[in-house]
Image (cartoon, grey):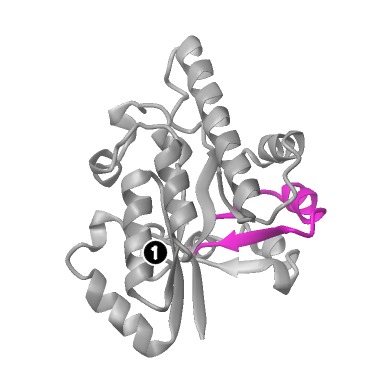
Amino acid sequence: MLFDSHTHLNLAAFDNDRDILLKKYLEEGIFLLNIGTCFKTSEKAVAIANKYSNCWASVGLHPGHTFPAPLEQLDQNEINNLVVEKFDSRFEDLIAQNKKVVAVGECGLDYSYLKDLPQEERDKAKTLQEQEFIKQIKVAQKYHLPLILHLRDLYQEALKILKENNYQGKAVFHFFTGTLEDLNKILENSNYFIGFSGVITYSNKLDEVIKGVPLERLLVETDAPYVAPIPYR
C-alpha cells in the first residue's frame, strides 16, 4: 500500500487523464490526498474524493493566492491558475458539509514572489498572507482537522504564528527543505509531521535532515504535477 500525502490531481494539468490515473491507482492500492489551493481546486478535490474510495481532500487557500504576484515571476501553469481571493465562508461550508475533507490547507507563508515589489506593497502582501493563514488555523481548530502547511523557508515564522494562536492540532510541514535546526524545532511538538517530495532526489543536501526525522513522523508526497523525481524530472 502507498499513500501520497500531498498531490494535486485536482488541477487542470490532469483534465485529460485524471480518471484513467485514479482508476489505475485504485486497482494498485494507491491512496492519496488531493490538496486545495484556492476555492476552485478545493471544490474539485472534494468532488474527486466523493467519487473515489481511495481519495480524500484538503480544503484551503495557498499563500500565493492571497496577493497578485508579478506575472513575469510565474510559469505558464501558475499564470493559468492565478486566482486572488480570501478564505471565506465558501471554504468553511465545503469543510463542514463533506466527510472526506480531512485537512485544511495548503496554507501558510511564501514571500518568494514578493521580492521585486516596492516595500509598501511587500509589507501589505505579507500581512494578507498572515491574515489568511490565521483564518485557516482557526477553522482547523474548529473542525479538529490537521493543517497542511506551505512554508517557503519561513518555518520559524510559522511556528511563532501557530504558538500565538494556541494551535493544538496536528500539522504537516509539506515539501520540507529546511535545516536541521528548523527540523528539531518542529519536532519538539509531537503533533507535527514532515513531508518530503521528489526534490530530495535533486541533490544530497537534505540527506542528514531526512535521517533526523523519526519514521512515524515522516510522510511521502509527489506534489504532482510538480517536482517529478530524478530521472523523471
> Which range of residues does the magenta coloring cover?
173-197
Q: Secondary structure at mark 1?
A: loop
Give the residue at x 42% y 78%.
Answer: 54
- State the image quarter where residue 224 is shown: bottom left
Give the image location of residue 23, x and y in percent. 29, 82
Q: Nearer the viewer, residue 111 or 189?
A: 189
Left or right: where 24 falls relative to 156: left
Q: Nearer the viewer, residue 11 or 39?
A: 39
Q: Which residue is mark 1?
A: 228
Answer above or below: position of 122 versus 16. above
Q: Residues within 10 Å of mark 1 (few under 14, many from 20)?
A: some
Give the residue at x 42% y 21%.
Answer: 116
Give the image location of residue 97, x and y in percent. 44, 56
Give the image location of residue 45, x and y in percent. 36, 59
Residue 180 within the segment the image draws in magenta = yes
Give the residue at x 35% y 27%.
Answer: 68
Considering every residue shown, the one lying at the far bottom of the view is: 27
Considering every residue shown, the one lying at the far front of the view is: 97
Give the residue at x 75% y 49%.
Answer: 168
Residue 8 seen in this snapshot: yes
Considering every residue shown, the one lying at the far right of the view is: 188
Left or right: where 197 falls relative to 26: right
What is the number of callouts on the image?
1
Answer above or below: position of 159 versus 102. above
Considering every residue shown, the one lying at the far left of the view is: 16
Q: Nearer the viewer, residue 49 or 151?
A: 49
The quadrant of the image that shows the C terminus is bottom left
Q: Amino acid at mark 1?
A: Ala
- State the image quarter where residue 204 is shown: bottom right
Residue 152 seen in this snapshot: no
Residue 136 within the segment the image draws in magenta = no
